[in-house]
Image (cartoon, rainbow, N blue to C red):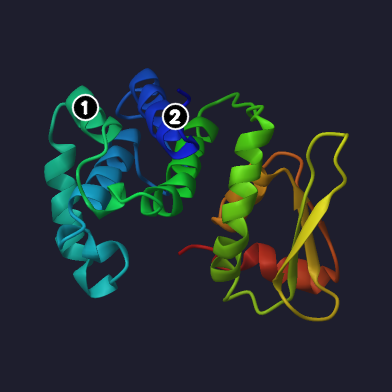
């Protein structure tokens, strides 16, 4: 039985982390692979309190201390704890898909794309469809600070025409075109992209590209 995308990306992220090592860079600012693994562990297993600083700035210190404790463990042990999801609300059917698919896909790519010579992955049509179904809602949230109309347009295999989704309504939108996985990376604030194009008023494109697209 094939695992769902969120589980496969979790396992693939762990495999990549072990391959590149604890001190490998990521696309998450100054975080190393060790820091990223600690973040994922605290996010999931500290949902009842220690992870609160991920979303509430006044509690950042609580989360930072929890991450430091997690990061102090031997790296292989830390990674293996991330590999197997704990019995938390994240394991509720449906919740795991909605909360972990993009989280693990993006962070896996954060590891991959921070390494020299990275190349884009060829995802299956099913996986691209899954990313497309999830990114549309996330993109609306991540572009809230841009203040411009946005349309996302997916490109995929030659036998299918491009498909568009309105992210933010308005005249003369910025049309962001790429494969779903690349659109995910853009709308999650990453600039290390492959074959993503932008159409629309130049000033609107600049505002969207320069906006804080984090969550």
The residue where tag 1 is placed is 75
66 to the left or right of 104: left
**SS for tag 1?**
helix
Residue 21 sits in quarter: top left
Q: Is residue 50 above or below residue 145?
A: above
Disc 1 crowd rating (10 Å Cα; few below 14, some 14-19, many 20+) is many
Q: Can the viewer see residue 80?
A: yes
The structure residue drawn at horizontal position 54% and vertical position 55%, both measured from the top left corner, is 188
Quadrant in which the C terminus is drawn: bottom left
Q: Is residue 120 above or below residue 52?
A: above
Residue in front for this viewpoint, 158 or 194: 158
Residue visible at 84% across and 80% down in the picture:
171
**Relative image position of residue 184 (x, y in whole percent):** 60, 50
Q: Quadrant of residue 211?
A: bottom right
Position of 85 with respect to 10 (left or right) is left
Q: Nearer the viewer, residue 48 or 212?
A: 48
Secondary structure type for disc 2: loop
Question: Visible in this render: residue 191?
Answer: no
Q: Residue under circle 2? A: 3
In the rendered picture of this protein, how many numbered marks are placed on residues?
2
Kindly indicate whether the residue at mark 2 contacts the one at mark 1 (C-beta within 8 angstroms).
no
Work out whether residue 209 or residue 84 is closer to the camera in this orientation and state it. Answer: 84
- Counting residues from the start of the chain, the first of labels 1 and 2 encountered is 2
Circle 2 packing at 10 Å, graded few (<14), some (14-19), many (20+), is few
Q: Nearer the viewer, mark 1 or mark 2?
A: 2
Q: Position of residue 140 (x, y in %)?
A: 60, 69
Looking at the figure, which quarter contains the N terminus?
top left
Q: Which mark is residue 42?
A: none
- In this rendering, would 131 be left or right of 179? left
Q: Residue at position x 55%, y 26% from top? A: 116
């Amino acid at each position: 039985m094939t695992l769902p995308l969120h589980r496969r990306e979790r396992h693939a992220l762990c495999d990549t982390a072990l391959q590149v090592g604890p001190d490998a860079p990521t696309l998450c600012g100054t975080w190393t692979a060790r820091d990223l693994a600690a973040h994922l562990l605290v996010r999931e297993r500290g949902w009842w309190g220690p992870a609160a600083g991920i979303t509430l700035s006044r509690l950042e210190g609580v989360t930072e201390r929890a991450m430091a404790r997690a990061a102090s463990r031997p790296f292989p042990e830390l990674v293996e704890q991330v590999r197997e999801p704990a019995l938390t609300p994240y394991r509720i059917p449906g919740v795991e898909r909605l909360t972990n698919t993009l989280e693990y896909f993006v962070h896996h790519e954060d590891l991959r794309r921070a390494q020299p010579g990275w190349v884009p992955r060829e995802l299956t049509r099913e996986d691209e469809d899954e990313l497309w179904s999830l990114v549309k809602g996330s993109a609306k949230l991540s572009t809230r600070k841009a203040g411009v109309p946005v349309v996302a347009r997916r490109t995929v295999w030659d036998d299918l025409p491009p498909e568009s989704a309105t992210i933010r309504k308005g005249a003369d939108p910025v049309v962001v075109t790429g494969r779903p996985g690349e659109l995910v990376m853009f709308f999650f604030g990453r600039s290390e992209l492959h074959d993503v194009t932008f159409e629309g008023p130049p000033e609107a494109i600049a505002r969207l590209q320069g906006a804080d697209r984090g969550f």
